[in-house]
Image (cartoon, helix red, strand yellow):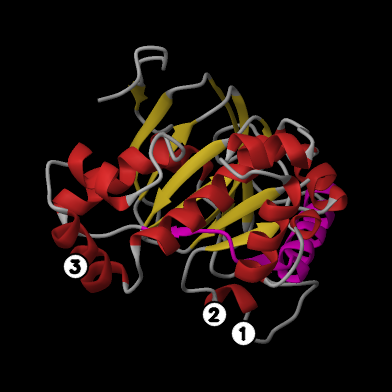
Amino acid sequence: MPSASRPRRTSVPPIDPLAYAPTPARPLRAKLRRLAAATRVDPHSHPWAQVAMSATGVIRMNAGDGTYLVPPTRALWIPPGVEHVVTVLEDAEIRTLYVHPAARFFGDAAETPFQRWTECRVLEVSPLLRELVAHLDTAAGTGRPGGQDEREASLAALILDELRRAAPVRLGVDLPRDKRLRQLCEAVLDEPTRWNSLAEWAQHADASPRTVARLFRSELGTTFLQWRQQVLLAHALTLSARKLPMATIAAELGYASASAFTAMVKRTLGAPPTHFFA
């Protein structure tokens, strides 16, 4: 059951994607949407690729068989046709890029790298990328009859090149298909620090710990503790977006000290928290 202090979620439909459809003449389109915390955008998909960014605030994206937290320091690449759901965790200004399959870099005629990006991926957002996206036209409609003007074409080319160069980050959480396990996983995502043990979470899901452990192995190929560790790492992104000190983040996630949290991040991701969190 959700906490009494948590605001009730409000579901809203997606904005008509055809109003921002990319074309060969305008292969990169941008959309701006401001949403309040606890807003959920209904499931939808597009025949083109999407890059979800949050200029301010934090959003959670359920896409395919994974869930991803997207603070201002990160972006999420979603391939064409992948259904996704947006949940706003903190009041957010969401900037969305729609990428046409024909999008290329500075007239490069070879196969675009984006055609090989067939799975969701979390990308680092450089200061340059953030500024370039902020200057893109976000008006709906087909726009200019002749396609892009020179300025928009230059911005689009630079943005696509920054996306190509952006380092992928191993921060995402797999989601199961089993309905019982899915409900439990979504409860953990909503309140990752509510309980620590599998037994406590299993009781919340009205299932035996053995059953839950078996489902984690068969559905996700991991243990509950390993999966929850990924949830905590993703949750740390939300906390770091508030510019909290590492000691505060560690305490919020249930670690006795910042050094204990740092050791876990190094062990899991192969680099210290400063490499992943703002």
Element on which disc 3 rests: helix
Indicate which disc residue 151 carries: none
Query: Does the segment drawn in magenta span residue 14?
Result: no
Name the residue that disc number 1 marks. 111
- Percent across and percent down for residue 70 are 59, 45
Residue stretch in magenta: 150-174
Circle nearer the N terminus (1, 2): 1
Q: Which residue in the structure is indicated by mark 3?
A: 214
Position of the C terminus, as image quadrant, is top right
Residue in the picture at 41% in, 45% down: 196
User: Does residue 157 belong to the magenta stretch?
Assistant: yes
Q: 161 above or below 56? A: below
Residue extending farthest bottom:
110
Amino acid type of the residue that numbered disc 2 sits on in the rendered structure: Arg
| Residue 111: quarter of image | bottom right
Q: Residue at (70%, 62%) from the top-left corner? A: 263
Q: Counting other residues with Cα less than 10 Å from the Cα at mark 1, is it few (<14), some (14-19), or many (20 or more)?
A: few
Prevailing secondary structure of the magenta residues? helix
